[in-house]
Image (cartoon, rainbow, N blue to C red):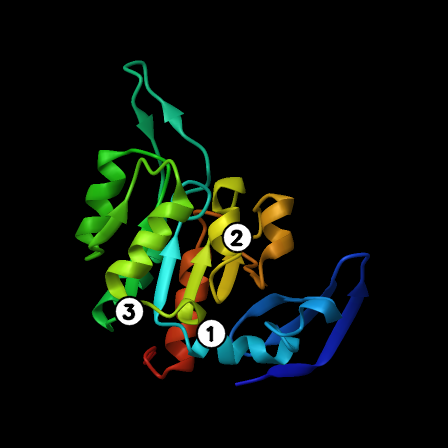
Amino acid sequence: MGSSSVCSWQSGAANWVLTANCQLTNCQLKMYPPDNTERFQHAGNILGRFKDIHTFIFDVDGVLTNGEVLVTEQGELLRKMSVRDGQALRMAVEEGFRILILTKGKSEGVVARLRELGIRDVLYNVQNKLKAYEEFLDAYDLDEDGILYMGDDLPDFEVMRRVGLPTCPQDAVPEIREISHYISPLNGGAGCARDVIEKVMKLNGMWNY
């Protein structure tokens, strides 16, 4: 699949942004300036890079949730997650994709939910995401070019600079949007995880609907 022929360019001081209508979904594709073209030659490569993904890494707060917490009188922090994201995560696990959840948060309810979806690698209460990421790479001997990471805030920054396809929700902070190669049209907790999973699976003939 390819993008449509109607595209609009916006020039900026540090980068170019290409907004294109893809057949999979409306999306925003980021193109780096000439001095960074070794890693990202042109915006047309983006769908090919989705197709080559073998591993997904997701933050929780602001990605799998809307970034808000409800504080009860007992001090418990409650989060809301999308069941549509959950369905896509389950389908990805069943198709053999590796999924890592990497979060600084600590919620037994969130961990239980992710385990129920079949996700084995759930790292929570992580204070150094880059170190945890490197340990994950070593444990599974993974090729970084085939890793998609979706984050929304500064703790995700260093890892996102390492992976092959850094992505973010529509409402991510500016610093994360700046380094993302794909910005979902959906906000955190509102289907952004499903958005990227669905792209990868459709491009690999695994979304038979």
Q: Residues within 10 Å of mark 1 (few under 14, many from 20)?
A: many
Q: Nearer the viewer, residue 81 or 15?
A: 15
Name the residue that disc number 1 marks.
Answer: 50
Secondary element at tag 3:
loop
Gap in angstroms between the C-alphas marked 2 and 1:
16 Å
The mark total stands at 3
Is 21 located above or below residue 149 in the figure?
A: below
Q: Which mark is drawn over residue 169?
A: 2
Q: Which mark is drawn over residue 97?
A: 3
First in sequence: mark 1 vs mark 3: 1
Q: Amino acid at mark 1?
A: Phe
Secondary element at tag 2:
loop
Occupied quadrant, residue 205: bottom left
x then y, percent, for residue 173: 60, 43
Q: Nearer the viewer, residue 54 or 7?
A: 54
Q: Amino acid at mark 3?
A: Phe
Q: Amino acid at mark 2?
A: Pro
Gap in angstroms between the C-alphas marked 3 and 2:
21 Å
User: Residue at 40% across / 78% down in the picture?
Assistant: 202
Q: Nearer the viewer, residue 144 or 48?
A: 144
- Label 2–label 1 contact, CB within 8 A: no
Is 128 located above or below residue 86 in the figure?
A: above
Secondary element at tag 1:
helix
x then y, percent, for residue 156: 48, 46
Residue 151 in sight in this render: no
